[in-house]
Amino acid sequence: MSKWTANDLPDLTGRTVIVTGANSGIGLATCRALAGVGAHVVLAVRDLDRGRAAAVTVPGSSEVRRLDLADLSSVREFAAGWGDEVSILINNAGIMIVPEGRTADGFERQFGTNHLGHFALTNLLLPRITDRVVTVSSQAHKWDQGRMYLDNPNLTGQYTPARAYAQSKLSNLLFTSELQRRLTRAGSPVRAYAAHPGYAATSLQSHSGSRVMGALMQVGNAVFAQSAESGALPTLYAATQDLPGDSFVGPDGLREMRGAPKLVDRSAAAENVETAARLWDLSEELTGVAFPLTAQNP
């Protein structure tokens, strides 16, 4: 059996897809592939000028809208301005191993951007989503022994760039699982999936603030990494294939670093139902955004 590629994408004419962080890298590759098979893609980006420049390279139907996931007022404004149905939401945007900082709302930057921003966006848009939510995680969810710092999510006094990134990527998986449980209880046909790109050469690795780390990342991108187009394949697979809810898609190569998309395992920590429920409750408290659907099977 041949391996799945972007050439196997189905026709998406008439479908609308929102992609966060779509002005470069895997997000832009995702937009190009989906627009190429008929989808109307919405590039949800922080910088409108960069987003418009990226949209010029997207074949087919696209539009650009401003979204800053590090600012909940921007997330709310984006969601409030969305009046139509959306078939697929792809939570792709993220920042990686950056120096310590805070979002506009005072959250640790990586947890606030990678998880809380997407948590709020998903729940605010959920009444208009008709098919699925795909959230991009990472193999980094296994770092730091798979720990969540729910009593100190901002990692005050405990911050390291890698620890914060690992927590945010583990949060993406726990969020996906709990979202699927809630969708199932509500009797919703919407499905929640997660994906990870393996090791792809993008600008994500270039903001560490460390010259040494930056140089190592450049070497790794040049020697070991696959292209952004290849890194987008797990996202595209999760966005278009008929899969069980809460599926996790990654590359099929050695250590899941590269290759064709397949269903992959996650860490034991990412399967902890109690931790996922606690994270959801904390996320609702921090963002002021709750799951909008009513459970039919409590």
Image (tube, rainbow, N blue to C red):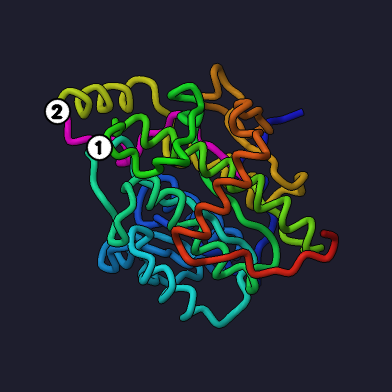
Is residue 208 shown to the viewer in this render? yes
Pick the residue in front: 47 or 31: 47
Q: Residue 222: give x, y in percent of width and height.
A: 31, 25
| Vertical placement of residue 140 versus 229, above or below | above
Up the image or down, 255 lies above or below 24; here it is: above
Residue bounds of the magenta highlight? 194-210
Disc 2 and disc 1 in contact, CB within 8 angstroms: no
Kindly identify the amino acid type of the residue bearing the numbered disc 2: Arg
Q: Which mark is residue 206?
A: 1
Quadrant location of the N terminus in the rendered image = top right
**Which residue is depicted at the point 64% across and 66% down?**
87
- For residue 63, what is the image quadrant? bottom left
Residue drawn at x 37%, y 30% is 163
Helix or strand or loop: what does disc 2 sit on?
A: helix
The image shows residue 199 at horizontal and vertical percentages of: 44, 29
- Give the residue at the far front of this rendering: 151
Question: Looking at this view, is 64 or 103 the one in front?
Answer: 103
